Amino acid sequence: MSSPSHNGPVGTGGNVFIASDYRYGDINVAFVTHHGVDFGNPDGTPLVAVAPGTIYYAGDDLSRQFGSHLNFYGNLVVKRVEGDVQIAAGDIAFATLVGHRTP
């Protein structure tokens, strides 16, 4: 991942428009609200970091679960963003997850 860009997580030359046709996720045949955003891009499109932070995990989710089940995201990168987000109950850590990546 490169340094932050005004295009969000998509690097130069990539599609920066959020896909509007994936508002719900199919989890075990039950449609649930999809809380992420998807950017349709071909293999090889560079990603950039959306904020400074530390890589928490990079690899597949075949043996470590990040979604509703194993192999939900395939290849993914989870990054802990610097600083905490303050909410009424206290501070929470914030992370970004980029899934469905080719190795």
Image (spheres, helix red, strand yellow):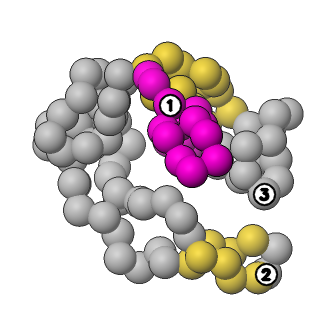
Amino acid type, mark 3: Ser
Q: Is residue 101 visible?
A: no
Residue matched to label 2: 29
Amino acid type, mark 2: Val
Q: Residue at x 59, y 76 (%)?
A: 33
Amino acid type, mark 1: Asp
* 3 and 1 marks in contact (CB < 8 Å): no
Q: Residue at x 42, y 60 (%)?
A: 37
Q: CA distance from mark 3 to mark 2?
A: 12 Å
Q: Which mark is residue 84?
A: 1
Which SS class for mark 1? strand
x and y percent of residue 86 in the render?
Answer: 50, 40
Which SS class for mark 2? loop
Residues in magenta, as a range: 82-101
Q: From the viewer's perspective, is 47 left or right of 73?
A: left
Q: CA distance from mark 2 to mark 1?
A: 35 Å
